[in-house]
Amino acid sequence: MALEWKLVVDCAEPIALARFWAAALGYEVEDNSALIDQLATSGAIGPEAYVETDGRLAFRELAAVRHPEDPVQPVSGMGLGRRLLFQAVPEPKQVKNRLHIDLHAGPDEREATVRRLVGLGATVLREVADRGSRHTTMVDPEGNEFDVQ
């Protein structure tokens, strides 16, 4: 039996990083307004736990992006498929990631994809040609490494 999963990324600014990755991947930022409203109305969370952004309520310390074709849980707005969750942590990033995302643009689109990602706030670290593969190693706005192949 296969397990469902999500990739969780520790960060300083979950909402901003979710916006970056949604634009980078063509994903959608999850809309958790209904869940936040339900939790706030029941007294389970206070106003310090959420903000209004882009005309909807969002958790201050959690934001996720999901593939636009995957199902969504109506009550929470959470994606039920391919999903990245960004969570605020107090400590800054200190070392190279042990896990990273590879974006597969293809050889004909790699350079254009890299330019688009730079326009979104990513930075190129280096070009790599190794073991018969070519890719560009980049970092997102918070310094998390990823590759564009």
Image (tube, rainbow, N blue to C red):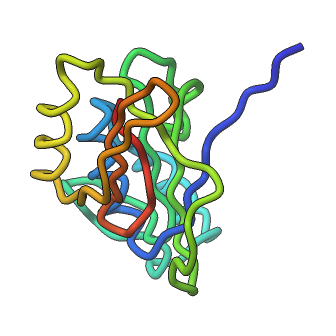
Taking the spot 28% from the left edge, 65% from the top edge, the residue there is 52
Taking the spot 10% from the left edge, 51% from the top edge, the residue there is 119
Q: Picture coordinates of residue 144 (x, y %)?
A: 44, 61
Quadrant the C terminus occupies: top left
Query: In the figure, is residue 124 to the left or right of 5?
Result: left
Taking the spot 57% from the left edge, 59% from the top edge, the residue there is 39
Q: Picture coordinates of residue 44 (x, y %)?
A: 64, 68
Query: In the figure, is residue 105 to the left or right of 9?
Result: left
Q: Picture coordinates of residue 12 (x, y %)?
A: 44, 76
- Of the pair 58 and 108, the residue shown nearer to us: 108
From what the image shows, is residue 31 above or below residue 134?
Answer: below
Taking the spot 36% from the left edge, 49% from the top edge, the residue there is 137
Q: Quadrant of residue 24?
A: top left
From what the image shows, is residue 136 above or below residue 82?
Answer: below
Query: In the figure, is residue 62 to the left or right of 4?
Result: left
From what the image shows, is residue 26 above or below residue 95?
Answer: above
Q: Quadrant of residue 23?
A: top left
Quadrant the N terminus occupies: top right
Query: In the figure, is residue 121 to the left or right of 33?
Result: left
